[in-house]
Image (cartoon, grey):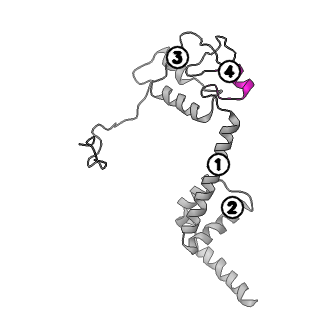
Amino acid sequence: MSCSRGNIIRKRPQKHQNKTAFKNDLHDTSKKTKVLNNLEVNGVCERCKEIIEWKIKYKKYKTLSAPRKCVGCELKKVKYAYHVLCTDCGKEKKICAKCCTSFDVIKKSDEENEDNNVNKYQSILKNLPERKRRTLLRYIKKQEDGQEISSTAIEALLSEIDKINLDDDLNDESSEDNLCGSD
């Protein structure tokens, strides 16, 4: 059994697998579902936005029947489910209306994630063979002309590294070697 004590390796695939993706409006054509599908989530951080969008996508979102009391101003102005602050207090204090974290902290964590991605790509470049690494670096220089390259562009380059024409790069290397040999 997969739930028996000490059994950490499962030997079979999961029993019930979905053949089609879930659609929240497949059998339900009510006005409520249409309104929820068109609902725009604003005033929350990215993580909370993803959580609320997931709830809407999989029909787990429960709307408020009456406005709730705001934690900030203590008036009944919260009109969106899962929010603890009204939109006015959230904008005024510059914090997420759901989890009450400041947007500055969220931006710093995003910058840290970007730094981690750069470190990850540097480690990938270190692990590449010398020929492919130099080819990739030359290709990046040709594409960007000294500008910073984003992590998504590096991912695309790494996935397409075999498509880069190595014959042109070999000609470039031989001309560089000739220049170095003449000094």
Q: Secondary structure at mark 4?
A: helix
Cα distance in 3D space between marks 1 and 3: 35 Å
- The magenta stretch spans residue 95: yes
Quarter of the figure with residue 66: top right
Residue range of the region highlighted in magenta in the rendering: 85-97
Of helix, strand and loop, which one carries label 1? helix
Say which residue label 4 marks: 87
Front-most of residues 4 and 21: 4
Residue 84 x/y as whole percent: 61, 21
Mark 2 nearby-residue class (10 Å; few <14, some 14–19, many ≥20): few
Residues under numbered marks 2 and 4 in contact, where contact means CB atoms less than 8 Å apart: no
Figure check: 2 above or below 130: above
Tell me the kind of residue under disc 3: Thr
C-alpha distance separating marks 3 and 2:
49 Å
For label 3, the residue is: 63
From the top left corner, tell me how far across and down residue 156 is, in percent.
57, 56
Residue drawn at point x = 75 percent, y = 62 percent: 146
Residue 136 pos. (x, y %): 61, 67
Q: Do callouts 3 and 4 mark residues in contact (Cβ within 8 Å)?
A: no
Question: Circle 4: is it few (<14), some (14-19), or many (20+) Cα within 10 Å?
Answer: many
Residue 143: mark in rendering: 2
Q: Name the residue tied to disc 1.
A: 112
Amino acid type at circle 2 is Gln
Label whose residue precedes the other's in the sequence (1 or 2): 1
Q: Amino acid at mark 1?
A: Glu
Residue type of the residue flagged with mark 4: Thr
Mark 1 or 3, which is nearer the eye? 1
Mark 1 and mark 3 lie on one chain; the one further toward the N terminus is 3
Question: Mark 3 or 4 closer to N-term?
Answer: 3
At mark 2, the secondary structure is helix
- Point out the residue furthest to the bottom here: 182
In the picture, the quarter occupied by the C terminus is bottom right
